[in-house]
Amino acid sequence: MKLDTKYFPAFMAVVAVLTALAIVFSSLRYKETQKERFIEAIQESDSLLTKQLLLINESDSVSIDQYKGNDIVVVFWSSWSEKSDLLLQEIYTLQDQTDSLVVISALVLDATDDISNTKFLDGFVHIDGASLYNELKVPGIPSYVLLDKKGALKYAHVGYQENAGYSLLSSKITE
């Protein structure tokens, strides 16, 4: 079948629109699939609560298990990410207003990062989060996981969204 040349521009416009829609749909579905894998990895992790996590600038380690009895937020962040700073500030404000919230700050460094220039917030438990980040297949920076008082997954958030570290997290804690 031969396409008449006068219909070719309209045909190409329809093909372009359909291709753009397919790309958008695939991208959104891929992001959702990544988040689903992240949540599955958390739920299937046998060692999430007991794994020894190296404290930053100390020779000791901690495990999430030792904070049971509190709501626990594990925040994956990086020093180069402005969105990480915004999310950390929101969580810091929430922690200041919440008695039983433990924040584990999982710093994810790459080979070029210099930790000596990194600012750490008081009251957070600061760990080297690279291995945990990779093990859990965290789909992006910043992200956080909320664990209930028994250590079970309550909520997972990926990326930055205004008030995700304060209002949204606060509502998830009280659910």
Image (cartoon, rainbow, N blue to C red):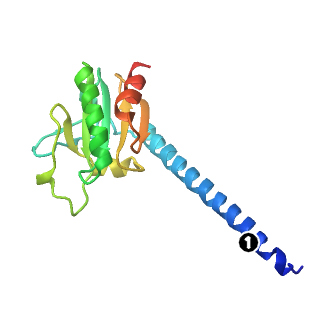
Does residue 70 show up?
Answer: yes
Q: Nearer the viewer, residue 138 or 123?
A: 123
Q: Is residue 47 above or below residue 166?
A: below
Residue 3 appears left or right of 49? right
Counting labels gives 1
Does residue 152 show up?
Answer: no
Residue 57 appears left or right of 86? left
Q: Nearer the viewer, residue 6 or 29?
A: 6
Where residue 57 sits: x, y (%)? 10, 46
At horizontal 60% and vertical 56% (from top left) the residue drawn is 24
Q: Is residue 35 above or below residue 73?
A: below
At horizontal 10% and vertical 44% (from top left) the residue drawn is 59
* Quarter where residue 14 is shown: bottom right
The quarter of the image holding the N terminus is bottom right
Where residue 45 sits: x, y (%)? 40, 40
Q: Which of 57 and 99 is in front in this view?
A: 99
